[in-house]
Image (tube, coloured by chain):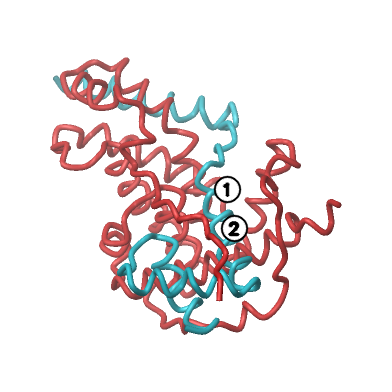
Chain colours: A cyan, B red
Amino acid sequence: MNCKTIVVELENYLDAELDPALRAEIEQHLGKCKKCRLIVDTTRKTIQIYCNSEPAPLPEDTHRRLHQALLKKLRAEKCRE
Amino acid sequence: MSTRNVEPVKPHSLPSQVVKEDEPVLVAAAKGGDLNAFDTLVTRYERKIFRLAQNITQNKEDAEDAMQEAFLKAFEHLGEFEGNSRFYTWLVRIAVNQALMKLRKRRPNQVSLDEEIDTGEEMLTREIEDWGPSPEERYKQNELGEILNEAIRDLDPSFRIVFQLRDIEELSTEETAELLGLSIPAVKSRLLRARLKLRQKLNRSFRRSDHL
């Protein structure tokens, strides 16, 4: 196990898609290699920060136009019935 | 030789864990003609769908159009939604298709999701620093949002969309591959590159040494 293998397997490792033996090897390497540990930790943190981030509020005019378009569609549907 | 205990990686939370539990009830009511129920779904997801469309198109007008068209199509085809997936996942699929159409129309020669991309290690050779336990707590919500937006905006579109679908919308690798017409190895390769590039970009804001 070396640093290049960590890179190759990083995606599977972070997504918990590795067989237990390879996972154990990687974790043994991470225990010894600060550089790889930082890469794994900060990449995991990157995913978590984006995953937990709240989208910005919709601009008021964008929200209004969306609901106007839906209302128009609803009215058109009702006329067709 | 002793090894340091490494915190186990938790798999991503499943989409079903992050959605409000009343979604199926609202969808059923909307299918039955309850317009308020559909409006509740729109209000619930409009911000997320707009962010998704904006991250794909990188253009506010196109994102707004794609979002509108996605909700209108969802309403029009609601009767065809069989509930085999979450409603939100179904909506994301519609929105991605609308946003990709906008993107291809605006930049027909620049958008290819099929291009070959090498998996590389070259990005790992610099800027490896600790971020501390909670880098995001150092920033106000809007400042953090701007940092995240700026980093993702700089990504190659073919990386950005895969990261958006896998790590923000939490689609599976298989769902992402199917939606984008990519192979599973291609999705994995792009996701790895996207994650590493974003990590590198965020490192400039989050590294602990700048905040000590």
The amino acid type of the residue labelled 1 equals Ile
- Secondary structure at badge 1 equals helix
Could you classify mark 1 by the number of other residues whose Cα lies within 10 Å: few (under 14), some (14-19), or many (20 or more)?
some
Q: Residue B112 location, x and y as percent?
A: 42, 73
Mark 2 sits on what residue? Answer: B152
Q: Is residue B41 above or below residue B176?
A: above
At horizontal 59% and vertical 67% (from top left) the residue drawn is A37
* Residue B175 location (% of width, % of height): 27, 57
Q: Quadrant of residue B127?
A: bottom right
Residue B171 position, x and y percent, is 34, 52
Q: Is residue A56 left or right of residue B50?
A: right
Is residue B108 among what the camera can see? no
CB within 8 Å, label 1 to label 2 = no
| Residue A74 in which image quadrant | top left
Q: Distance of mark 1 from mark 2, alpha carbons?
A: 12 Å
Q: Residue at x 72, y 65 (%)?
A: B129
Q: Is residue A29 above or below residue B137?
A: below
Q: Residue at x 29, y 26 (%)?
A: B23
Subunit of label 1: A
Q: Residue at x 75, y 58 (%)?
A: B207
Indicate whether B59 appears above or below A77. below
Q: Nearer the viewer, mark 1 or mark 2?
A: 1
Q: Describe the element under mark 2 as helix, strand or loop.
A: helix
B196 left or right of A13 in image: right
Residue bearing the label numbered 1: A49
> Numbered disc 2: what chain?
B
Q: Tell me where residue B73 appears, x and y as whole percent.
A: 28, 39
